[in-house]
Amino acid sequence: MHRPELTRKKTLWMVITPQIALLLISTLWIFFFPKDNVSKYFNFSFLILLEGLLTGLGFALAGYGFYYFAKKTKKFYEAVELFEQVLSPTFKNLKLIDLVLLSFISGFNEEVFFRGLIFPKVGIILSSLAFGALHFPGKRYWIYAVWATGSAAVFAYLFFLSNSLWLPITAHFVNNLIGMILLTRLANKKPI
């Protein structure tokens, strides 16, 4: 089945719209429940930034390693199909500035919602499962949701250890940015 190619504008709106909804839900939550205000979790230090950068790089390398393993061994080939036939064409027409913007918006909004608001209420398991459910593209690609659930658990643990949302936000941003860059290169038939 041939999918019509997405324009840059359609792709941006397709990715940003759920993020706007998540930001709206978070804002309303904090408005109606001021004691849950996440501003207390925005403790910053250069060590937190460095840890986030390294963690995000580690996640991105592990994700690429999994893709490479799946491609070479033909195990979890649905993951290869997801990356090559679904996600990669989605990011084909985006520019580097788009990838940076989308990576930051998704990293920031998802961490504020899932780690800043959900995690303190329901704990690591339920908040991670909720994050995985948000990243469930369908039963054929179940492995992606499993990966997202595991990532969420690590992000929650980082948040718990640091008491700062900047650590998981930075890790999430770096992981997303590297992943999107690789998907864009794959779509444009450049070596990755």
Image (cartoon, helix red, strand yellow):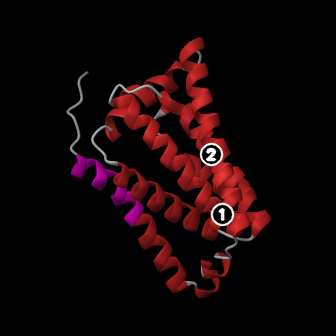
Q: Tag 1: Cα neighbours inside 10 Å, few (<14), some, or many (≥20)?
A: some
The residue stretch that appears in magenta = 8-20
Residue with the most extreme right position: 161
Q: Name the residue located 73 percent from the left edge and 65 percent from the top edge.
A: 47
Query: Does residue 156 appear left or right of residue 182 in this picture?
Result: right
Question: Looking at the image, which is closer to me, 94 or 66?
Answer: 94
The prevailing secondary structure element of the residues shown in magenta is helix
Residue 188 position, x and y percent, is 32, 30
Q: How far apart are marks 1 and 2 (CA)?
A: 12 Å
Q: Which residue position is annotated with label 2?
A: 57
Q: Where on the picture, by quarter, is residue 36?
A: bottom right
7 vs 127: above or below: above
Residue with the most extreme top position: 73
Query: Does residue 134 appear left or right of residue 164 in this picture?
Result: left
Q: How many marks?
A: 2
Q: Where on the picture, by quarter, is residue 74?
A: top right
Point out the tag, 1 or 2, that comes first from the N-terminus. Answer: 1
Q: Tag 2: Cα neighbours inside 10 Å, few (<14), some, or many (≥20)?
A: many
Q: Which residue position is annotated with label 1?
A: 49
35 vs 106: above or below: below
Amino acid on which the number 2 mark rests in the picture: Leu
Q: Name the residue located 38 percent from the left edge and 65 percent from the top edge.
A: 20
Amino acid on which the number 1 mark rests in the picture: Leu
